[in-house]
C-alpha cells in the first residue's frame, strides 16, 4: 500500500483503478486499511517519508472538518 502511495498519478481515477486491479479491493476499503496503516509503527519504520506525509494530509483534512 505504501508503494502505491509513493507513485504519482496521471489523471483522475487512475489511483482507484490501480487499487482495484493490483490489490483487488475497493477504493473505500483501501482508504480504510491505509488509515489504519498510518498508525502502525512498523509502517513508519519501513517508509517514514511516505507515512509522515500521509499523516500530515490526514491531519489537515481533519482540521477542515
Image: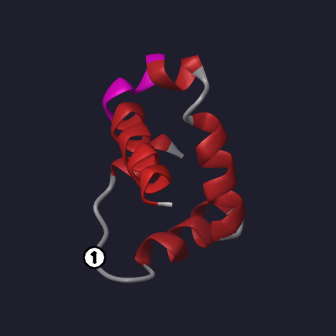
In the rendered view, tell whether residue 12 sits above or below residue 32.
Answer: below
Q: What element carries label 1?
A: loop
Main SS class of the magenta portion in the image: helix
What sort of colour scheme is used for the picture?
secondary structure
Rendered location of residue 38, percent (x, y): 55, 35
The quadrant where residue 19 appears: bottom right
| Image spot of residue 9 (x, y percent) | 31, 69
Left or right: 16 with respect to 55? right
Residue indicated by mark 1: 10
Q: Which of 41 and 61 is in front in this view?
A: 61
Seen at 64% across and 58% down, the residue is 30
Residue 14 percent across, percent down from the top left: 42, 77
Q: In this view, does 11 lie to the left or right of 43?
A: left
Classed neighbour count for the residue bearing mark 1: other residues with Cα under 10 Å, few (<14), some (14–19), many (≥20):
few
Residue 36 falls inside the magenta stretch: no
**Region of the chain picked out in magenta, as a range:** 45-49
Residue occupying the point 51% across, 69% down? 18
Amino acid at each position: 500500500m505504501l508503494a502505491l502511495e509513493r507513485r504519482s498519478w496521471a489523471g483522475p481515477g487512475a489511483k482507484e483503478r490501480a487499487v482495484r486491479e493490483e490489490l483487488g479491493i475497493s477504493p473505500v476499503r483501501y482508504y480504510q486499511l491505509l488509515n489504519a496503516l498510518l498508525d502502525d509503527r512498523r509502517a513508519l519504520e519501513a517508509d517514514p517519508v511516505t507515512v509522515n506525509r500521509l499523516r500530515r494530509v490526514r491531519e489537515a483534512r481533519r482540521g477542515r472538518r
